[in-house]
Image (cartoon, grey):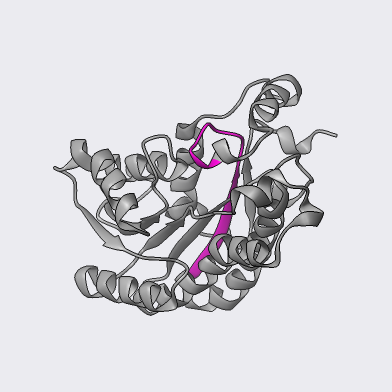
Amino acid sequence: MDLLQIKDKNIVVMGVANERSIAWGIAKRLLEAGANVIFTYRKDRSKSKLDKVLADYIEYNTAVIQCDVNSDESITSAFQQIGEQYGVIHGIVHSVAFANAEDLKNRFVETSRDGYAFAQDTSAYSLVAVANAARPFMTEGGSIVTMSYLGGDRVLDGYNVMGVAKAALEASVRYLAADLGAEGIRVNAISAGAIRTLAAKGVPSFNTMLHKIEESSPLKRNVTQEEVADMTLVMLSKLSSGVTGETIFVDSGYHIMG
């Protein structure tokens, strides 16, 4: 019995940077489960990296569409194209976040106005814009899952402006869940533990975080890309049909510790 019921569903995955991306771990699981996966990329350089990752998956049902999340026009165009090609969107994985390097290295109090606005626009508002563009095509309901991090709840050294953006992202999840629930659309966040991704390289204290989680978390280890992917598939599937507006932690239990 297929409990996930993901096969033949049309799922948009945003934010694959390379094979170590959390988004790629999720996409792989979706492809293995028989989903039709539509990948989005921001710039041409991102597309070349995505094409490289997908080279070994040419037998699967995939599409690659440009979507610059800093542009309303690009978002609207991308989802119009997806809607026309696939008819119905059943799910979205929003794994998009970015902040300027100097705004991560400097103290938070020194964050520039432009840097703050850019981090918020890319990492938090993009979820709102994507949900609004996608909902006309989510005619059978569906699930939107975004990726957060503990820095949205607590002060983590070196996370700075991104932590504030993740806090806004999680608040956006709750407000979107309230708005879209009547349409059968669920919105949730996964707060993943520290994983060695391209984005993680920009956080100066990342290696310290990894060691601290191994020492302090209930499971005494860091989580894997596959574990985050598995929980995301649950949140995209019928198995979580009664859950919306939540932030689900997949971090070896680290967030519960004092």
Q: Is residue 106 above or below residue 12?
A: above
Q: Residue at x 65, y 55 (%)?
A: 166
Q: Residue at x 54, y 62 (%)?
A: 122
Q: Residue at x 27, y 69 (%)?
A: 82
* First to last magenta residue range: 184-199
Residue 193 included in the magenta stretch of the image: yes
Residue 73, percent from left and from top: 38, 79
Image quarter where the N terminus lies is top left
- From the viewer's perspective, tell me whether residue 219 is left or right of residue 40: right
Residue 84, percent from left and from top: 22, 75
Q: Residue at x 29, y 52 (%)?
A: 47
Q: In which quarter of the view is residue 256 placed?
A: top right
- From the viewer's perspective, tell me whether residue 203 is left or right of residue 236: right
Residue 158 included in the magenta stretch of the image: no
- In depth, the one of 197 and 8 nearer the eye is 197
- In depth, the one of 218 and 200 nearer the eye is 200
Q: In which quarter of the view is residue 161 placed?
A: bottom right
